[in-house]
Amino acid sequence: MNPLYVSVMVIFLLLYLGIAVWAGRKKVVTSKDFLIAGFKLGPIVLVGTYLATFYSGASLIGGTGMVYRLGIAGNWWPLFYALATVINVFIAIRIRGKLLETPPEFMERRYGSRLLRILASIGLVVGTLFGTLVQYKAMGIAWTLATGASPEMGIIIGGILMTVVVTIGGLMSVAYSDVLKAAVFTVAIIWAGMWCLTTFDLSSVLDKLSTLSTPPQVGAPPTPAGSLVSLIGTLGVYMLIFQAINWIFGIGIHPQYVQRMSAGKDMKTTLLQYLISWPILCAIYILLMIVALTARAVIPTMPEGYTTDWALPYFLTTYAPPLVGAMFFAGIAAAAISTVDSQLELIAASIFSDIIEPLSGKKLTDKERLKWSRITALVIALAMILVALRPSPLLLLIQAYGWGILAAIYAAPLIFGLYWKRGNREGALAASIIGGLLATVFQAMQFMGLLPPYMAPAAPAILASLLVYVIVTLMFPAPPEELTRNFFPEK
Amino acid sequence: MEGDFLIMLVLSIIILNLPAITAAILLKKPQLWASGAKREEGG
C-alpha cells in the first residue's frame, strides 16, 4: 500500500461526496432539478459534466490498452467519437428547446406513441445497465491498485458514495461533482503526458515501435513488424468501417449525450459545451496515445499476469514519479465514478419518468415526483452494488453488446424524427423493433462464429433500421400536424 | 522511421476539433437554430 496513492484517492472521494451533497441540498428544489438539473446548467458545470461523460474507465484502461496492443491504429476510436459528436451537435440544435426530462420522452412528443417511449426506455436501461457494471469493476481494480485492499471493498465504498449522490441530488449532484472528476482526470492525463514527453524521446520511441515484433502480452501472437506505426495496423479496412458505423451512430444518438444537451440553460450554452470541450478532449486523446505508445516501446510485452488493458497503470506506477502515479489512479477512479453515477441517474430517471409514472396513471404533485424519483434512484443504485459484487459471466457478455443495440433502437427515430417532417409513428416503431431485434440476432451470430470477426454486429442493424424507417414511413400517412408542429415550426 | 504517426497526429488534430468547429459555425449563425429553440423555451 502506497500512502501517497491512498491519500490522494481518499481526498478525491471526500471532495466528490462533499460537492455532490452540497449541490443536491442547495440546488434541488423541484423534480426537474433532480431529473434534468432544472434545464439550467451554466457553461462551466455543463463542460465539466460533458467532459466527464467521455472520461470513463473504458477510455482510460481499454482505450489505451488498445493503442498499446495495436499501435497508432488504436487511436481511430477517439476520432469516431468526434465524428459522432458532429451528429450530436445537429441533434442538439433541434432538440434542446423541447425541454425533455428524459431522452425517451422525445418518442412520445414527436410520434405520439407511449409504447415507443416505453420501448425506448427499456432499450436505454438494457443498453446502459450492463456497461455500468463493468465500470464498477474498473473502480474496484483502481481501488485495489491504489490501496492494496480488495476490489470488493472499492466497489462497496464507491457504490455507497454514488448511491448517496444520485439519491440526494440526481443529475444536479452528478453534474456539479463531474466538474471535480473532469478536473482530476484532465490534470492526471496532462501531467502523465508531459512527464512522458519530457522523459522519453518520441522519435526514438517510434523508431523502436517500427521494428518491434514481440507479443503485447504473454500468450498473445507476435506483433507483425511495422504494424504499430501503421494507420491500419492489423485491424484491416473492413473492421475500421464497421467500427466507424457502430461508434459514430452509437455515440451520435446515445441518450447520455442527448441528456447533456438538454441540461444546459440555453442553446448558446449547449453549443459552448462542444466548443470548449473538444479542444480539451483533442489534447487528452493525443496525450493518451503518446503515453500508450511510449509504454509499448519501454515495456514491449506485459509481464505475466497482466493484460494489455493494464499497460498504462503498470507503466506509470513502475516508471513515473509517485505523484503522477497517484493522480493517475485518482483519475481512473474519477473516470469510472463519473460514468457510473451518470448512467445510474439516467437509468433511474428514465425508469421513473418513462415507465413507472406513465403506467401508474396517477397525476403526481411535484413533491411526490421528487420523492419517487429519489426512491427509484436509491433502489436501483443499491441493487447495482449487489449485482456488481457478483456479476455473472452472462451479464458481462451482454454489456459488450448493449451499446450497439441502443444505437439500433434509437438512431432512426431520433435522427429522422428531427429532420424529416414526413417521418411517422409506424416507421419509428418498425425501425426500433427491427433494429433492436437484428442487433441482437447479429450479436448472437457473431458469438456463434457465424459472422466474420471484423464485423461489428450492430453496424448492419443500424443501417437496416434506417432503411426500414424510410420504407415503412412511406407506406403510412404523414403524421398529424399537432405532433410535428413543435419540431418543425413555420419559418 | 516514424511510419504513419504524423498522419495520425494531423488527422487527430483536425477530426477531434470538428465538433468545436461545427459549434463555432452554429454560434456565428444563430438563424440556423434560433427559431426552433426559442419557440418552447420562451413559452
Image (tube, rainbow, N blue to C red):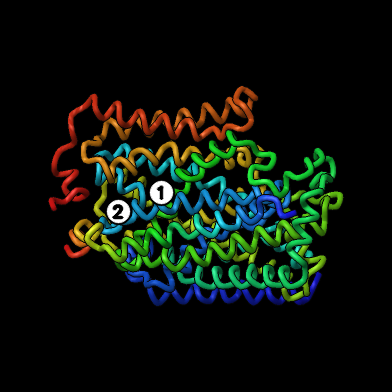
Q: In the rendered image, which quarter contains the N terminus of chain A? A: bottom right
Dot 1, how many residues are within 10 Å of its Cα: few (below 14), some (14-19), or many (20+)? many
Q: Is residue A138 visible?
A: no
Identify the amino acid type marked 1.
Ile
Which class describes the residues within 10 Å of circle 2: few (<14), some (14-19), or many (20+)?
A: many
Q: Which residue is mark 1?
A: A351
Q: What residue sits 59% from the left and 36% below the top?
A: A237
Find numbered disc 1 in the image and state the secondary structure of the residue it sits on. helix
Mark 1 and mark 2: Cα distance apart in space: 21 Å
Q: Can residue A208 be seen from the camera position used here?
A: yes
In the depicted view, which residue is nearer to us: A99 or A78?
A78
Q: Is residue A2 above or below residue A225?
A: below
Q: Residue at x 68, y 58 (%)?
A: A140
Q: Residue at x 49, y 43 (%)?
A: A127
Residue to which mark 2 is pinned: A95
Looking at the picture, how far across and down is residue A160, in whole percent? 58, 63
- Residue A105 percent coordinates (x, y): 31, 48
Q: Position of residue A451 (x, y in %)?
A: 60, 25
Question: Closest to the observer: B36 or A211?
Answer: A211
Secondary structure beneath disc 2?
helix
